Image (cartoon, grey):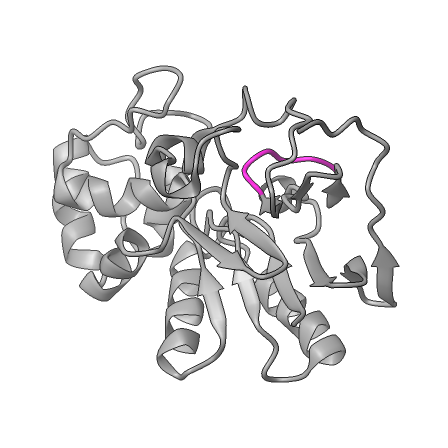
Amino acid sequence: MRFYAIGDIHGQLELLKNAHARIMRDGGQDALIIHVGDLIDRGPDSRGVVEYLSRGQRDGRPWIVTQGNHDRFLPNFLRDPDWIDPGLSSPEHWVDHPGLGAEATLASYGVDPTLPRHRLHAEAVQAVPPAHADFLASLPLWFLHPLALVVHAGIRPGIDLQDQAELDLVWIRKGFLESGADHGPLIVHGHTAIRSATHYGNRLNIDGGAAYGRPLCAVVIEPAGTWLLTDEGRTPLLPEQVGVTG
């Protein structure tokens, strides 16, 4: 019944492999691992992360990968060099925005990120394997497990899962993070970087900030509770005393 979850990866291949190693020590080679998305951008090896996870799935590993907002940028750029994600607070292009991390992703594919956008697009189309773009574009927006709902950013409280807007699932903060509502299942998410995995009672944020030099969180969720996996073993993640309302 238990499953494992890993927070936002952001091109940190070695941290991802280390997180998988912690999980294997705890749960064995066949452990179900659910990743909350944001495979690419900011870190040094986005290409390696996509190849590693997609190859693992092709090899039959029980790995689920949900789509993060950053996973939308590369495949949509390859499809349309002028595409701007409507979820961005400012209408700035992926390759122009200083904080989104496009430079690192493109460089991991051997593309010079300083090229003019349309030349950059042509180079990227040649350099990025179509299978990588297809993998990112086809990632599911959520995964419902008997113990929790895993989704990249969160949900809009009070809305049925099947009616949730895609932009909310990959971008939401306001309206979700401050909500004390009982969502039904525990919501396991990333997207909002914090110091380490934190259990808020109705949700569990596992984005520990690997994109910013902090550890990549791996957690185990069982009927009896939730734990953060460290090199020394399990550390309990106890729900904070927050008011949860119906």
The quadrant in which residue 72 appears is: top left
Give the x, y percent position of residue 175: 55, 21
Q: Is residue 49 above or below residue 210?
A: below
Q: Is residue 46 left or right of residue 106?
A: right
Residue at figure coordinates x 71%, y 61% from the top left: 221
The quadrant in which residue 164 appears is: top left
Residue at figure coordinates x 21%, y 58% from the top left: 127
Q: Give 235 or 92, whichever is nearer the viewer.
A: 235
Total label count? 0
Question: Is residue 94 one of those drawn in magenta?
Answer: no
Main SS of residues in magenta: loop
Q: Is residue 69 left or right of residue 8?
A: left
Give the x, y percent position of residue 234: 84, 64
Question: Is residue 193 one of those drawn in magenta?
Answer: yes
Give the x, y percent position of residue 215: 70, 51
Give the x, y percent position of residue 236: 86, 55
Q: Is residue 124 above or below residue 84?
A: below
Residue at figure coordinates x 48%, y 28% from the top left: 172
Q: Give 10 or 219, whichever is nearer the viewer.
A: 219
Quadrant (top left/top right/bottom left/bottom right) for the N terminus:
bottom right
Quadrant (top left/top right/bottom left/bottom right) for the C terminus:
top right
Q: Residue furthest top?
A: 90
Residue at figure coordinates x 27%, y 52% from the top left: 137
Residue 112, visible in the rendered structure: no
Q: Residue furthest front?
A: 246
Q: Which residues are magenta?
A: 190-195
Residue 194, visible in the rendered structure: yes
The quadrant in which residue 129 appears is: bottom left
